[in-house]
Amino acid sequence: MTPTPATGRVVLVGGGPGDPGLLTIAGRDALAEADVVVTDRLGPVAAIAEHAPHAEVVHVGKIPRGPFTPQERINEILVEHARAGKVVVRLKGGDGFVFGRGGEEWQECRAAGVPVEVIPGVSSATSVPALAGIPVTHRGLTQGVAVVSGHVAPDDPRSDVAWEALAAAGLTIVVLMGVAHLGAIAHTLVAAGLPAATPAACIMDGASPQQRVVAATLEQIAEAAAAARIGPPAITVIGPVVDALDLP
């Protein structure tokens, strides 16, 4: 009779916005137990050397217009190592369930019969603006925030964001993965009635020593970001909160 292979487990760890100091204690403890760490460029890679020095590290890059590991292959890697009896930490930036495709990895592990757990992380959607001095909500300015993906342009058939509704919602708009389509996003929001003078800011390399912030009006933010060579990873914040704390 063929023995049943030992089954390890997968831990989906949100690593926070990039600064290893913003990794949670639970995330740190998971790294300390890891036999294998599956990570990408947005995870706090420096934390691996500190907390998981003996773990096997598997890099699964997703660089825009660069090296790219398909999500399907990432799912397979997690399952393969867990089925070999290993504790596998999937370390990614921010919170894995906020545009991190953590839900897909959870589903794949469950379908394969692999034990899986989640350790939430500090989401870049709120923490990176905070580190730039921008509160995504502020009394007297807005009572809510909408976090949306800008990885496709508003007029792209693949986009299911109701940009016109956002323009009228009175909410802070936080756009992730939207640098390439920032001009189209701004144009769509202005055409839908959001004032062209609405404050906006792009934050590049948030939570790192290289963090840069570019502020302008909504009408001018794409041009200002391009002039400053803002590129991924970057987050755009649109709304009066950009000026709430007198951002220089």
Image (cartoon, grey):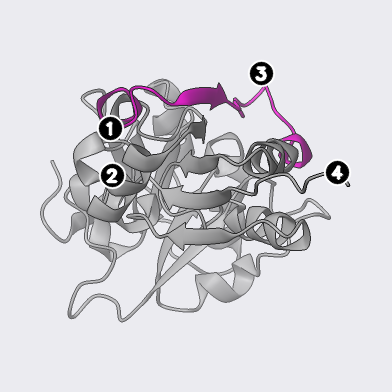
Q: Is residue 58 magenta?
A: yes
Tag 2 residue: 28
Disc 1 to disc 2: CB gap under 8 Å: yes
Answer with mark 1 or mark 3, whichever residue precedes in sequence. Answer: 1
Determine the secondary structure under disc 1.
helix
**Is residue 197 in view?**
no
Tag 3 residue: 67
Answer with mark 4 or mark 2, whichever residue precedes in sequence. Answer: 4
What amino acid is found at the position of numbered circle 3 in the picture?
Pro
Tag 1 residue: 51
Answer with mark 1 or mark 4, whichever residue precedes in sequence. Answer: 4
Answer with mark 1 or mark 2, whichever residue precedes in sequence. Answer: 2
Tag 4 residue: 2
Mark 1 to mark 4 CA distance (whole Å) = 36 Å
Nearest the camera: 156 or 104? Answer: 104
Q: Is residue 229 above or below residue 31?
A: above
What are the residue bounds of the magenta stretch?
A: 48-73
Determine the secondary structure under disc 4.
loop
In percent of width and height, residue 58 lies at: 56, 24
